[in-house]
Image (cartoon, grey):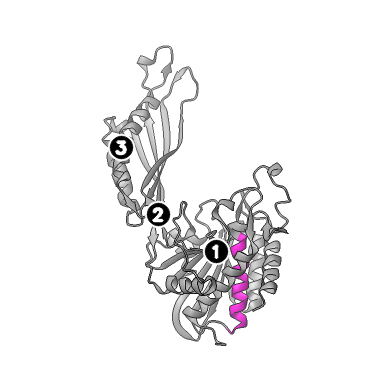
Amino acid sequence: MDENALAQELTRRLADLIAIPSPYPPGDTRKICAYTAALMREAGFETEILSREDGIDNVVARLKGAQDGPSLVFNAHADTVGIGTRENWRTDPFEAVEGAGLVTGLGAGNCKGSMATHIWLAQEIARAGGPARGEVVFTFVGDEERLGPQGLQFLRETDAVKPTILVLGAQTENQLITEERGVMWLKVTAHGKAAHAGNPAVGDNAISRMVRVLTHLDAVLTPQLEARVAGDKHSTISVGMITGGHNTNVVPDRCIVEIDRRLLPDEKVEAAFAEMKSILEDAGEPADLLDIEFLTGTNGFSAPADGPGVTALVNAVTARTGTAPAFLNATGVSDGRYFADDNIEIINFGPGAGAQGHAANESVPINEMVEAAIIQLDMVTGLLGLNES
């Protein structure tokens, strides 16, 4: 394989992708998905564009083998964050700039670098005659940056994809993330009675009530969570938002907080909510003056280290680099969380460093894109075989 030619092809493809704006807001992926779907159809994939919300398109491209086998699904999200403060960019965010072995532009690392490698990978599989067994599927989705339900979650809910192994493009510097914590958000509303601040005794201060509730929650739950550790992963809680009152001289009649809980892979969202709800209800406040609402949540996942997908990818990385890959600890959550309860292998893998995502002058190393492309082709060959081999 001519790796210089591959580097040039990936760089050109990434430049095309960067030049098609897809920032959230608004998260419009119609143009970039139309571009990607055309390439998949041209390569010979059975391709469709699926959507249930105007402006958020998703591509599903499928190529089947002649024999039964696993469904290997590659996913990359096509939306990006916004440009932020334009003055912080040294170049046009929507124009790829190559230099010092990097491609710079909005979404270069998160996640258009992985999109470029997946497009090449799909074309290379097709050039080789397709998989010998099972199927290989490529999905390019929207609504990831919004953490919304109209991208990969939509594809799962409609059975558009039913993976045995799911590989998500991510900025892992071509290392692996095979475990991810779950996430659960809840909202707590404390009620009170408004009054003039000059005579607070005739009112009932909702912010003061919330302070008491949160103090109780911290005293009871935080010590328990500190003991919940699995390797480098910790079970955590964070108060992310608090609002209350409307004027300094008015005793507030309402205070709202939203809380983030990160769960170890063996913790479950339903149990975590029940645990927190019980603690909050035991804070000593009148039940009718405290509302506790579940907002959203997904369980974590942990792919077995000896699973066929993980094994094939580890072998491919080792063959390419001469060193077994590291298994990284994920700080955030990926779209893989929608499949956490499906008993499949979920792996995050791709070029670029996580620190580059969501930052001005975002970039991805060209050599890592080349490496990711070759490694993933080797993985496909090991798992599904190729008809030419």
Q: Give the structural element (helix, strand or loop) at label 1.
A: loop
Identify the residue at image location x=73%, y=51%: 92
Residue 328 in the image, given as x and y percentages of width and height: 45, 58
Q: Which comes sooner in the sequence, label 1 or label 3?
A: 3
Q: Is residue 125 magenta?
A: yes
Q: Which comes sooner in the sequence, label 2 or label 1?
A: 2
Q: CA distance from mark 2 to mark 1?
A: 19 Å
Q: Marks 1 and 3: CB-CB under 8 Å? A: no
- Is 123 drawn above or below residue 350 in the view shown? below
In the foreground, 17 or 388: 388
Q: Amino acid at mark 1?
A: Gly
Around disc 2, counting alpha carbons within 10 Å, would you say few (fewer than 14), some (14 to 19), or many (20 or more)?
A: many
Q: Give the structural element (helix, strand or loop) at label 2.
A: loop
Q: Which residue is mark 1?
A: 350
In the foreground, 321 or 291: 321
Residue 5 in the image, given as x and y percentages of width and height: 70, 74
Q: Which residue is mark 2?
A: 181
What range of the chain is rendered magenta? 112-129
Q: Which comes sooner in the sequence, label 2 or label 3?
A: 2
Residue 163 appears anywhere in the view: no
Q: Is residue 257 magenta?
A: no
Q: Amino acid at mark 2?
A: Arg
Identify the residue at image location x=56%, y=56%: 353
Camera-side mark, 2 or 3: 2
Q: CA distance from mark 1 to mark 3?
A: 41 Å
Q: Which residue is mark 3?
A: 280
What is the quadrant of residue 42 in the picture? bottom right
- Is 35 drawn above or below residue 197 in the view shown? below
